[in-house]
Image (cartoon, helix red, strand yellow):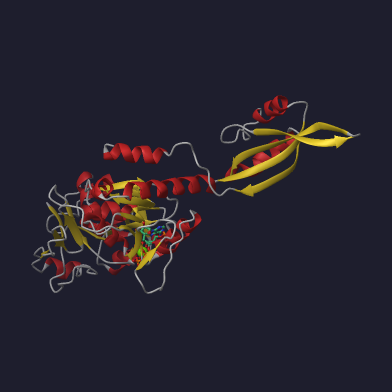
Amino acid sequence: MIMSLRAPPSSTSSSCSLFPSRRSMHSTSRAMLPLSVAFPTRFVSCSLLQDQVSVDTGAGSKVSDRNELRLGLPSKGRMADDTLDLLKDCQLSVRKVNPRQYVADIPQLSNLEVWFQRPKDIVRKLLSGDLDLGIVGLDIVREYGQGSEDLIIVHDSLDFGDCHLSIAIPKYGIFENINSMEELARMPQWTADKPLRVATGFTYLGSKFMREKGLKHVVFSTADGALEAAPAMGIADAILDLVSSGTTLRENNLKEIKDGIVLESQAVLVASKKSLVHRKGLLDTTHEIIERLEAHLRAVGQFTVVANMRGNSADEVAQRVLSQPSLAGLQGPTVSPVFCKRDGEVVVDYYAIVICVPKKALYKSVQQLRAIGGSGVLVSPLTYIFDEETPRWQELLGKLGL
Ligand SMILES: Nc1ncnc2c1ncn2[C@@H]1O[C@H](COP(=O)(O)OP(=O)(O)OP(=O)(O)O)[C@@H](O)[C@H]1O
Ligand SMILES: O=P(O)(O)OC[C@H]1O[C@H](OP(=O)(O)OP(=O)(O)O)[C@H](O)[C@@H]1O
Ligand SMILES: [Mg+2]
């Protein structure tokens, strides 16, 4: 069974390498090139196989000796701006003194350093104990975390960076009638001598997935981008890459296949378990970050709607509002009397109702309000919705056994 990551014969680089053409590939002896790297003792030991890292986070590793807490954020790429925007929306603006500096702070969170790093390095540094928290795509956590139990997903849906990791094959040639992983695995073309060549940046997840899907003869090559070009260039048969809109695949004559999705991904907040347990102050800071994230992300999808409604009593108005399916709000409507003066007397003809409405259901809600006599409808955005309890915090305590 061939399930290995190999470098082209002439290459000593650990990344950016694609296979030589099929002919030269099969006429060359292709030894695996495991590279081992010695780190200073402060780091946990790693062995590199091309671009992959397997990290020993065994019981012997300790949290490093520092007082500051450290949060890793993406230094570049598509996640970088969205991450800063999200934190800003949670009133956790990152203060960067100099755009070329890799360290910053968040004035609201004392004793926390922000370090800007490449996403894969954030995961590596969480494992080595050099970071405590990080915001990256789940794909990167799973690929570079390699199943380590020291990585804990603290918030699993930060609502940006949505994509999935998927196998894609050409629409043409020998793949024209191949539409599922099962059919791909059954193709007679893949043998020990001529394995299926997959170009990917996700060799750990890729080899695990191929094994699970019963593909015995597979060989991976790595590249840092534009993987979709590899099949047309003749240097790979298939690719394993992130897909969002599907445009890049379509434009390159590639297709996804049934059961070919390895992982659904979006931005997550991830932490080192060791740090959470041992580093003073980290749990409190993490609690505050979770609270702010949850309160903000809940609010993002909702509007506050205020309307006036004629009625005889608050109860009667509430009955009318609750008779409509889109007007229940988060915990039912707030109904308050609107006092006005008529002929020298204070009277109540109207009631103000306040509800939270999902953004998607806004227009339907306004129609339903009008149908039951609502007028003067005011709609405003919400900044935060703080619940009594943060379910993710309870989950985290559970995972930590606290
Ligand atoms: N097309 C996409 N749509 C949405 N999210 C994506 C997409 N591609 C990648 N992502 C998410 O963004 C993260 C960062 O993407 P990526 O590593 O490709 O960075 P980049 O911005 O393209 O920079 P570079 O590839 O040059 O390093 C990925 O790990 C993934 O979680
Ligand atoms: O389904 P789509 O919406 O077309 O997005 C998918 C593309 O986005 C990512 O690449 P990116 O744009 O980050 O470029 P890169 O390959 O240089 O990283 C990914 O690697 C795909 O190529
Ligand atoms: Mg990219």
Q: Is residue 381 visible to the viewer in this orientation of the structure?
A: yes
289 on left or right of 67? right
Q: Position of residue 71 (x, y in %)?
A: 34, 58
310 on left or right of 291? right
Front in this rendered view, residue 201 or 303? 303
Front in this rendered view, residue 94 or 14? 94
Q: Position of residue 276 (x, y in %)?
A: 28, 47
Q: Is residue 211 above or below residue 140?
A: above
Front in this rendered view, residue 88 or 7? 88
Q: Is residue 10 above or below residue 324?
A: below
Q: Position of residue 161 (x, y in %)?
A: 41, 56
Front in this rendered view, residue 8 or 326? 326
Q: Is residue 259 visible to the viewer in this orientation of the structure?
A: no
Q: At 19% from the left edge and 51% from the top edge, which residue is drawn?
A: 188
Q: Is residue 222 above or below residue 3?
A: below
Q: Position of residue 191 (x, y in %)?
A: 15, 54
383 on left or right of 310? left
Assign ligand 3 to one image quadrant.
bottom left
Where on the picture, by quarter, is residue 391?
A: top left
Q: At 19% from the left edge and 47% from the top edge, which residue is drawn?
A: 211
Tally the marks.
Answer: 0
40 on left or right of 348? left
Where on the picture, by quarter, is residue 103?
A: bottom left
* Quadrant position of the C terminus in the picture: top left
Q: Is residue 337 above or below residue 31?
A: above
